[in-house]
Image (cartoon, rainbow, N blue to C red):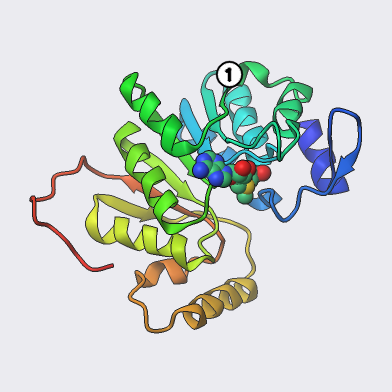
Amino acid sequence: MNQLLEEIYSTKLVKDAAGNSINPFPTATPYDIGVVLKEFIQKYNLERTLEVGMAYGLSTLFICQAHQDKGTGIHTAIDPMQNNLWKSIGLLNIERAGLADKLRFMESCSHEALPQLLTKGEKLDFAFIDGSHHFDYTLIDFFYIDKLLHLGGYVVFDDIWMPGIRKVVSYIIRNRNYELMKINTKTSAWKGFAKSTKRFLQNPLERDYGGIKLISSNVCVLKKTSEDNRDWDYHRSF
Ligand SMILES: C[S@@+](CC[C@H](N)C(=O)[O-])C[C@H]1O[C@@H](n2cnc3c(N)ncnc32)[C@H](O)[C@@H]1O
């Protein structure tokens, strides 16, 4: 594993350009989720990856390190607030880790950056959605990422503890050609049970796709199984 990542997770601190320490949690991706992202990208040899939402760059470090370890691959990170709100710490961390050649950074909102990539004819193998956590923004992220994603590509949603994110995932599973993948995060059975119970209590009467509430971690992975081939009037409640 990258030495900077080890240091950040052991100290629970990141440093700005002046050397001041900041606790990146709970904004930053937990270690076990970062490891899952990295191992997933390496296991399936995913070359063109993208993430929405960089902040202090912890998920970015894991993903760029996966490309470094594979020897090939390029990652695109999109975040409109990297330089002001996050004091460029995400970009500094990538430099400090020696991974700058693995990253393309776009300082924009995703609803502006993703259409640009589409217009350029770009394609993706993997995307991690961890930007704005509102239902509409997350759905728009998915809408464009689906168009950029190769058949057989993967999209990962963070923070499925939030009802708005689960709604987006429910919509996809019920209306689009994506399947929910099983991933192994080292969540204990007890913690998994507590998470699922909390999700059921959050919106007990809603028709969320049941499988999402039962996932033991805070991320879910969807695989694109075919291009969009719905009839013009197709709709399933979600
Ligand atoms: C939870 S943080 C991301 C954490 C990061 N993935 C990590 O592991 O450290 C959410 C990020 O989304 C960004 N964000 C918010 N709205 C956005 C938008 N419309 N487009 C892209 N990024 C957005 C925020 O600036 C913030 O950096």
Q: Is residue 137 left or right of residue 84?
A: left
Tag 1 secondary structure: loop
Q: Position of residue 78 (x, y in %)?
A: 54, 33
Residue 102 percent location from the top left of the image:
60, 20
Task: State left or right for residue 94 relative to residue 178.
Answer: right
Query: Residue 7: x, y in percent?
Result: 84, 39
Report which quarter residue 224 is drawn in. top left
For the point 41% across and 32% down, which residue is it? Answer: 114
Query: Which residue carries the number 1 mark?
Result: 71
Answer above or below: position of 195 versus 114.
Answer: below
Give the answer, above or below, for where 143 lies relative to 103.
below
Q: Residue at x 13, y 45 (%)?
A: 229
Pick the quarter of the image with the N terminus: top right
* Viewer-nearest residue: 237 or 72: 237
Q: Position of residue 129 (x, y in %)?
A: 49, 45
- Badge 1 crowding class, 10 Å Cα cut-off, few under 14, some 14 to 19, many 20 or more, is few
